[in-house]
Image (tube, rainbow, N blue to C red):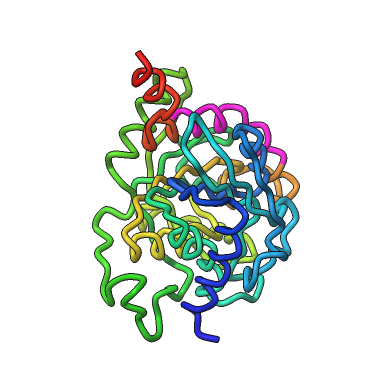
């Protein structure tokens, strides 16, 4: 079965479950950041291993389910449990979920991740709005035959992270008294953490943080004309900048400690970029 047929098959499965509503925005939640799904109403939840062709996450802290429902009247889809290149999946598998959400109508995508800081000024516990990225994974999800139905052969990446959405996030953070930074995210394929020498090299390249995800999804979203907002939860100082050895448990625990502010920020931004349908309905009734 061709990839486009698999995408449509999975989208059709979810469409039958949610009825006529189209997904206006999608949210991808990173390690330890899954609690945002509790913010939405009229929830329909399905394990990803029940969705045709959807790859299964094997990483602790990634539940592996899609949650669909309403946030202030807008229909959104939340993916709890992305898959990664280092799990042995192809990058086409890694971005499969993004492709499916686009076929459900998604116009906007908010991607979150847990990341290590390569910038001494951005400390653990911070939220960083991603303004650009450096792809050091060594591959690209668009390699191979282009599917014109999905997007152009050579998509523009000059504004991979939508400036309008970045401004909305900064405004929301200011209104909520949440301190945020803005910086460049580098992505490596993992699963080993970076060496001190690699972190120095990343900093010289202009990276403010590093992760093992996000970039392939951003490329696929831009390929399909979906606007992207990226938020990194800084869970640790990258190797050579911190005082202790790093474990995945440390990353999860710090991510959970940031989740309260992240959830508030996500809710505010999503209402802004999708429009508060409840407010509109009340006005129409007057």
Report the front residue among 230 and 104: 104
* Residue at image location 42% in from the left, 30% down from the top: 277
x and y, in percent, of residue 33 in the image = 63, 42
Q: Which residues are magenta?
A: 253-268
54 above or below 113? below
Q: Residue at x 48, y 69 (%)?
A: 137
Q: Is residue 236 left or right of residue 269?
A: right
Labels in figure, total: 0
In the picture provided, is 51 more to the left or to the right than 120?
right
Is residue 212 or residue 239 the one in the foreground?
212
- Between residues 1 and 260, which one lies in front from this camera angle? 1
* Secondary structure predominantly adopted by residues drawn in magenta: helix
Q: Is residue 56 left or right of residue 267?
A: right
* Quarter of the view holding residue 191: bottom right
In the rendered image, residue 85 lying in the magenta stretch gets the answer: no
Q: Is residue 115 visible?
A: no
The C terminus - image quarter: top left
In percent of the image, x 66 and y 65: which residue is there?
51
Is residue 143 depicted above or below 73 in this figure? below
The x, y position of residue 249, in whole percent, is 75, 47
**Residue at the outermost top position:** 286
Q: Position of residue 70 (x, y in %)?
A: 54, 37
Quadrant occupied by the N terminus:
bottom right
Q: Position of residue 15 (x, y in %)?
A: 55, 58
Residue 65 in which image quadrant: bottom right
- Residue 103 is at least partly visible in this image: yes
């Amino acid at each position: 079965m061709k990839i486009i047929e698999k995408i449509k098959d999975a989208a059709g499965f979810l469409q039958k479950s949610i009825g006529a509503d189209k997904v206006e925005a999608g949210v991808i939640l990173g390690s330890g950041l899954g609690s945002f799904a509790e913010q939405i109403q009229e929830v329909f939840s399905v394990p990803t291993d029940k969705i045709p062709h959807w790859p299964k996450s094997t990483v602790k802290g990634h539940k592996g389910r899609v949650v669909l429902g309403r946030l202030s009247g807008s229909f959104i889809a939340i993916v709890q449990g992305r898959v990664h290149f280092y799990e042995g999946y192809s990058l086409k598998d890694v971005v499969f979920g993004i492709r499916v959400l686009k076929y459900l109508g998604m116009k906007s995508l908010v991607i979150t991740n847990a990341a290590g800081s390569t910038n001494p000024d951005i400390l653990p516990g911070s939220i960083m709005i991603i303004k650009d990225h450096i792809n050091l994974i060594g591959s690209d999800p668009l390699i191979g035959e282009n599917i014109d139905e999905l997007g152009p052969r050579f998509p523009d990446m000059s504004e991979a992270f939508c400036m309008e959405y970045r401004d909305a996030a900064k405004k929301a953070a200011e209104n909520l008294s949440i301190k945020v930074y803005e910086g460049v995210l580098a992505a490596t394929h993992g699963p080993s953490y970076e060496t001190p020498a690699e972190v120095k090299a990343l900093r010289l390249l202009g990276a403010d943080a590093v992760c093992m995800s996000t970039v392939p999804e951003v490329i696929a979203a831009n390929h399909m004309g979906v606007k992207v907002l990226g938020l990194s939860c800084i869970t640790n100082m990258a190797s050579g900048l911190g005082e202790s050895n790093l474990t995945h448990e440390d990353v999860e625990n710090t991510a959970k400690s940031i989740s309260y502010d992240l959830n508030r920020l996500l809710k505010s931004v999503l209402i802004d970029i999708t429009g508060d349908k409840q407010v509109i309905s009340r006005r129409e009734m007057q």
